[in-house]
Image: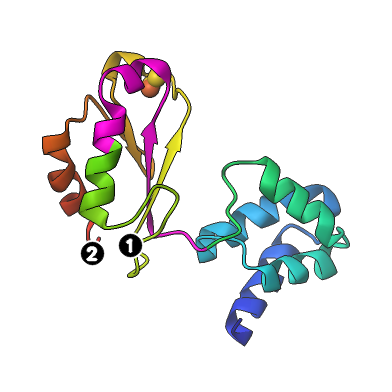
Amino acid sequence: MTAEAITKTKKIVSRWENKPENVIEMMHDVQNEFNYLPKELIKIISEESNVPVAQIYNIATFYKKFSLTPKGKHKICVCMGTPCHALGAPKVLSALERELKIKCGGTTEDMQFSLDISGCVGTCGLAPVVIIEDDLYGPVGVQGVQKLIKKYKDK
Ligand code: FES
């Protein structure tokens, strides 16, 4: 981990006044900065906030929004709730895997995209639904996948 990353992390922790009760916010900001929570930086958060490393790992594994492995710049999530599944989400997921040349749960080599699935996101009327970052798309067909990726590539 670079000295710059360590300094940035210390700044984030101090922005939250080094208070243990703000540890989730600190983790959130560190993840936003680096796209995941590197273990070296978890150690820094722990030292600077006095929250045990094990507790930070517990939080990181409990909340889906946190990742302990590097994630791509653009996070793609395919809804696999029952309606989306029934209306073709598995085919959309396969098309995304082919297009990105990764498996679900993976990240592209250039760190541009990560691909995951989720439970129902509450917009079943648009099934099958794909979420890229904060943008929701639906209904998404296999044919629309390439165009969708293109929209975010190198953005
Ligand atoms: S099942 Fe996909 S939005 Fe509800």
Task: Tell me if residue 30 is in the magenta stretch.
Answer: no
Query: How far across and how far down the image is residue 89, in percent?
Result: 30, 28
At horizontal 46% and vertical 33% (from top left) the residue drawn is: 118
Q: Which residue is mark 1?
A: 112
Q: Is residue 141 left or right of residue 135?
A: left
Q: Amino acid at mark 2?
A: Asp
- Front position in the image: 9 or 147: 147
Q: Which residue is mark 2?
A: 154
Query: How far across and how far down the image is residue 87, in percent?
Result: 26, 19
From what the image shows, is residue 135 above or below residue 75?
Answer: above
Q: Is residue 83 left or right of residue 105?
A: left
Q: Amino acid at mark 1?
A: Gln
At horizontal 68% and vertical 47% (from top left) the residue drawn is: 61
Mark 2 residue's CB less than 8 Å from ligand 1: no
From what the image shows, is residue 71 above or below residue 141?
Answer: below
Extent of the magenta region = 70-92
